[in-house]
Amino acid sequence: MICSFSPDLSEYPLMDSPTDSALLQEFADSLSESAFRKLVARHVDHVHSVALRVTRNADLARDVSQQTFARLATRPRSAPRGVSLAAWLHTTARSLSIDLVRSEESRRRRESAYQQHVTMNKPETSDWSDLEPVIDEAVESLSAADREIILLRFYRKHSHAEIGHNLNLAEDAARMRVRRALEKLRSRLAKRGIATTAAALALTLPAHAVTSAPAGLTASISTAAFAAAGTAAGGGSVATLIAMTKAHLAAIAAIAIAVPIITLQQTRNAKLKRTVDDLRTEALAPTLPPGVDSAPVPVRAVTRGASGIASLREILALGDPLNRIRELLAYIDRLPADQLGAALDELREGTPEWDPEAKMLVHMLLTRWAKEDPDAAFASLSGLDFKKRGGDATSILASLASLDPARAARWMNDPENTLVHFPKMGPILAGTITKEWVRQDPSSALAWARGLPDEQRAGAYGGLLGTLASTDPAAAAAMAATLEDGEPRQHAIGEIANTWARQAPRAALDWARSLEGSDRQAALDRTLGTWAQTEPAAAAAYLDGLASSEGIDRYLRPVASSWAIQSPSEAVAWVDAQPDGAGKNEAMGHVLWNWTTLDPQAASTWLGQQPTGPSTDAAIGGLAKAAFDSDPAGAIIWATQLSDTDTRNRAVEIGLHEWLLRDAKAATTWADQNGVTVPSPAGK
């Protein structure tokens, strides 16, 4: 049975009392001492209780409480958007407490702590002595929504009605959310070896999670923190200091020197009752299961970087992207191997899938895990959800191939391997293996790639030669010359051309022109297109300098398309000056498409000044395609200007048919007004 708890709400804010955010805003705007004292009084028991559980020392807990509120006073807007003040104080108090304890005693080896922990074989219990060492970390490991519910109900002791009011929920919905959050907390504790029930937690937490802070602590904290905030405020600091009493100054001094003095005393006397490992002790994570998704419960790495940031959640909340990336890299380096799965789960719960930083971090976490436990990593590949986690396979396989490419190749060739037959995965995985193998043994990598099926071989050649070209493009080109004719070879040549063109485009072009047939075309297309992305005018000048006998007509498009994105008027002038031909017409269509997308008015003005002809028809086609989504009537009107009768009639018919599918009424009205026959549904 889930037992309810009816707290005495007399000392907690009523529904119509100022919210935390309102009080904090008032303090931030005007340094209102009254507003800050209300916040301290409202949360001091919570903060002190967390600090006392972590430090197991009343003096240290008092100091941590002062530091926590001093940090709030000097940086009242430091809580990330969307995080409640209670959650911010909880995390800050716990982090400061851990730092203080950690400075006093070196950590015991985690494996030893784990062995002691897992052999305890505890029965189901709600004994506070079992919960106390891990409860705050378990609460912090919950999702933001569940953590907020637990804090409101069992730390702040709000009723279900008050929780519903705060979260804009009905009372019954709030009660259900509490039950679900409590069950998740129970599950988190179970993974730490604490067997209990949600009902037992509902009885135990209200009685023990938050206890009364020592008498006078609220006043002491408020005075000291408020004074510190005044000092940090800048212009008013002198007046604030003059107005302070000796008690104020003593309080500030206490915050500044309390931790060093206590640290020295505690170190000398060895009075601390436990180490940081006692705070972090929990079951070492088992090897990740095949899906890699069901990792152990998220945990907070206590080891901090130079900035003092410990948790992934704190790092992701940083405002400076460059600093955030630095911290993410440092976080990966210092994260214990047994916590990789937990960090992966936390990352996926807290970031959108498209976030490039999240993708980078997922790749790094999986790479480290595969290196730590290659057997489990290989086993996991067969159980991946390809549609949801296809990218995980390449991260894991790249790490495994860097360790043992021959073993990765055997996995790839295994007849029971279903992953390689998944659409498009075969060539991607083959390329993933060869891009790592070529760094160690290019000849062996090439020999293996030659024996793959055509589709996989194209991916393998591309990964091998594209990677080699990044450091030695001439060697990659020489190796490509030994490959058999066909699509895989052309794919590899394109990869070399793309990489070489970014380093030395003229050297790459000299190589491309030395090739023949389809190899030459593939290399020139990629080289010119890549060069034009950075230096379109130079690429265009290079083409102008070639003899007409070299068949440059087909290479106009890659240069013109890239140039049109940067300077469409220059690109269209260059294309317009080229000799008439199919290549010019194709390039003109691409240029006008890009130009219309960027500046439709300028594109249409230029086009209206051009004489009729095949090149202008191609330009009209490009404009009409680009403009159709935003202005179908205008696009069709442009289509009516095509000089070739058959092309014009077909373009108008297709455009009107598409318009009918999107907006039949508007299309029919336009057709009636312009005397155009509405095509039948099969007209396209």
Image (spheres, helix red, strand yellow):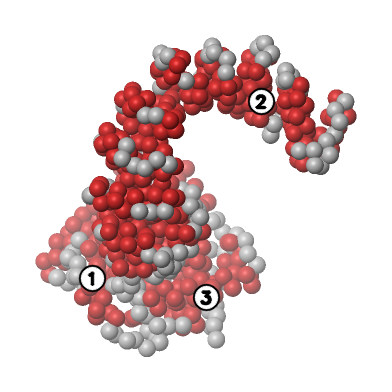
Q: Residue at x 41, y 44 (%)?
A: 488
Q: CA distance from mark 1 to mark 3?
A: 39 Å
Q: Amino acid at mark 3?
A: Pro
Residue lying at the far left in this picture: please name it.
268
Disc ID at residue 110: 1
Q: Position of residue 504 (x, y in %)?
A: 31, 26
Q: Amino acid at mark 1?
A: Arg
Left or right of 598 on screen, residue 141:
left
Q: Earlier in the sequence, mark 1 or mark 2?
A: 1
Disc ID at residue 554: none
Q: Is residue 493 or residue 192 the one in the foreground? A: 493
> In the rendered view, would you say 517 is above or below 340?
above
Q: Position of residue 553 (x, y in %)?
A: 51, 20
**Contact (CB < 8 A) between labels 1 and 2?**
no
**Contact (CB < 8 A) between labels 1 and 3?**
no
Disc ID at residue 621: 2
- Total labels: the figure holds 3
* Residue located beneath label 3 in the image: 7
From the image, state whether disc 1 or disc 2 is nearer to you.
2
Q: Is residue 584 or residue 448 the one in the foreground? A: 448
Q: CA distance from mark 1 to mark 2?
A: 68 Å
Query: Residue 111 occupies which quadrant of the picture?
Result: bottom left
Q: Position of residue 242 (x, y in %)?
A: 30, 41
Q: Residue at x 76, y 21 (%)?
A: 645
Q: Secondary structure at mark 3?
A: loop
Q: Residue at x 44, y 61 (%)?
A: 419
Counting other residues with Cα less than 10 Å from the Cα at mark 3, is it few (<14), some (14-19), or many (20 or more)?
A: some
> In the rendered view, would you say 627 is above or below 191?
above
Q: Secondary structure at mark 1?
A: helix
Counting other residues with Cα less than 10 Å from the Cα at mark 1, is it few (<14), some (14-19), or many (20 or more)?
A: some
